[in-house]
Image (tube, rainbow, N blue to C red):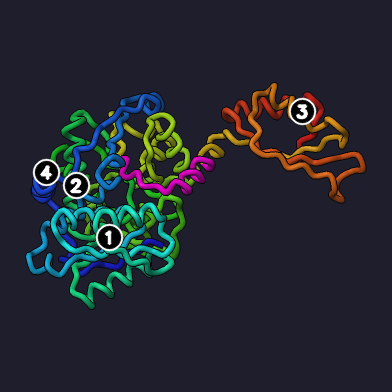
């Protein structure tokens, strides 16, 4: 569970528009002004223009550089001399590593032992010393905190600091500049740093614009926390969207989100995987599940959003092996995989005849398991388990109809 401990920082207070504008000046020439791209498919679903704010194309592959650089740039000379330390399984690690390198500050980043090798390698390439510690992020965070206490290095929290929130808020300023007619901004929420920062910028300049946060159902700490009026820790979190897999809201962003964010929605794992698939297929964008959470919300209930809509694609750092699994999950959620078992007569050519039926039905066979010896089978029966690639729910129904008309009995 990604549940960062509270940083020794100023008491929670409201980050101002001036703070965000100052951060924008600090980030000039460092963070990219990322593109705003239209989505014709989502626009047709919503019934109004939908745009992607492509922070997946930011340096280090996510918005995290904005907050990390703003925070480290604000350190005193003495603090910089002591170096900085962070803990992360991915995006924050890379953001801190690059920010520290650009500012000439020594950085140490603790990452879990099981962190994906591409993310570890990228963090090292950006200039950090990486220490692989702990099996889960909680253990890694504790190790980073202990290191900070022992060495005097400044702990750089991923979201729970005013400077970090201000840096992330520069995304909101860019959205208003690039899409002045925007009516709704949709952004993923983990600890809440980027959503809080965007809300500060957007609501100060355009209070009529709705800001909607999105959490994964398996890591939705904000709804119960907002209901309680204080940050509440979840007992457990579980989601493919590791970038927003946070078990407790940060104190600083929680106050801002409670005051300024219009609504926090939750999305299912099926919706997240479908959103990643849509970004890849329709927008030609590699987006991690956390970054695709706003798209998942739009897919889940498109009529609920007033347009024009800007969906923040907050990151694109996803391990290739995980991406492969997510895409399979997304295709299954979209009805493009069909798993079934059926019985046929155990005689020469029977399997080939059945496969011909599937060929005519235009179903692509991914895997076949052929069982002849099972006490459940009759003397002349065989059982076949199939994994098929289809074109969607209607095609799945058509394939099942074709098998039935050909005399095959589907049993599961």
Which quadrant of the figure has residue 39? top left
* Residue 189 x %, y %: 32, 50
Tell which tag, 1 or 3, sits nearer the viewer.
3
Determine the secondary structure under disc 2: helix
Residue contact at pointers 4 and 1, CB within 8 angstroms? no
Is residue 188 visible in the rendered image? The answer is yes
Instruction: Say which residue appears at 20% left-offset and 55% top-offset.
Output: 68
Instruction: Give residue 250's mark.
Output: 1
Determine the secondary structure under disc 1: loop
Observer-nearest of 18 and 80: 80
Instruction: First in sequence, mark 3 or 2: give its number.
Output: 2
Instruction: First in sequence, mark 1 or 2: give its number.
Output: 2
Q: Residues within 10 Å of mark 1 (few under 14, many from 20)?
A: many
Instruction: Give residue 404's mark.
Output: 3
Instruction: Say which residue appears at 24% left-offset and 57% top-offset.
Output: 127
Residue contact at pointers 3 and 4, CB within 8 angstroms? no
Observer-nearest of 393 and 202: 393
52 is higher (above) or lower (below) than 68 = above
Relative to 398, 310 lies left or right: left
Q: CA distance from mark 2 to mark 4?
A: 14 Å
Q: CA distance from mark 3 to mark 4?
A: 64 Å
Instruction: Give residue 28's mark.
Output: 4
Q: CA distance from mark 1 to mark 2?
A: 15 Å
Q: CA distance from mark 3 to mark 2?
A: 57 Å
Q: Which residue is mark 2?
A: 169
């Amino acid at each position: 569970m990604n549940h960062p401990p509270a940083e020794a920082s100023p008491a929670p207070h409201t980050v101002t528009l001036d703070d965000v504008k100052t951060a924008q000046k600090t980030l000039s020439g460092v963070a990219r002004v990322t593109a705003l791209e239209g989505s014709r498919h989502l626009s047709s679903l919503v019934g109004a223009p939908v745009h992607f704010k492509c922070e997946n194309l930011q340096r280090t592959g996510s918005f995290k550089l904005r907050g990390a650089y703003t925070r480290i740039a604000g350190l005193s000379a003495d603090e910089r001399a002591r170096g900085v330390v962070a803990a992360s399984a991915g995006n924050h690690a890379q953001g801190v590593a690059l920010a520290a390198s650009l500012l000439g500050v020594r950085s140490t980043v603790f990452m879990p032992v099981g962190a994906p090798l591409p993310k570890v390698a990228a963090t090292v390439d950006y200039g950090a010393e990486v220490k692989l510690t702990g099996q889960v992020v909680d253990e890694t965070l504790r190790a980073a905190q202990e290191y900070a206490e022992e060495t005097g290095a400044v702990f750089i929290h991923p979201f729970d600091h005013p400077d970090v929130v201000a840096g992330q808020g520069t995304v909101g300023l860019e959205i208003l500049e690039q899409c002045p007619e925007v009516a709704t901004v949709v952004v993923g929420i983990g600890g809440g740093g980027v959503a809080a920062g965007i809300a500060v910028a957007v609501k100060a300049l355009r209070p009529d614009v709705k800001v909607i946060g999105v959490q994964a159902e398996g890591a939705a700490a904000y709804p119960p926390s907002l209901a309680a009026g204080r940050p509440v820790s979840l007992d457990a979190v579980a989601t493919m969207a590791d970038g927003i897999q946070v078990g407790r809201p940060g104190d600083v962003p929680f106050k801002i989100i409670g005051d300024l964010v219009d609504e926090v929605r939750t999305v299912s794992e099926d919706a997240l995987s479908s959103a990643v698939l849509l970004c890849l297929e329709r927008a030609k964008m590699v987006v991690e599940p956390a970054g695709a959470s706003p798209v998942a919300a739009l897919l889940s209930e498109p009529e609920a959003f007033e347009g024009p809509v800007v969906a923040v694609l907050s990151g694109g750092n996803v391990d290739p092996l995980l991406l492969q699994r997510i895409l399979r999950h997304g295709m299954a959620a979209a009805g493009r995989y069909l798993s079934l078992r059926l019985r046929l007569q155990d005689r020469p050519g029977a399997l080939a005849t059945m496969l011909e039926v599937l060929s005519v039905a235009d179903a692509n066979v991914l895997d076949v398991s052929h069982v002849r010896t099972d006490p459940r089978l009759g003397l002349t029966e065989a059982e076949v388990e199939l994994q098929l690639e289809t074109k969607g729910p209607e095609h799945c129904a058509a394939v099942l109809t074709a098998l039935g008309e050909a005399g095959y009995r589907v049993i599961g």
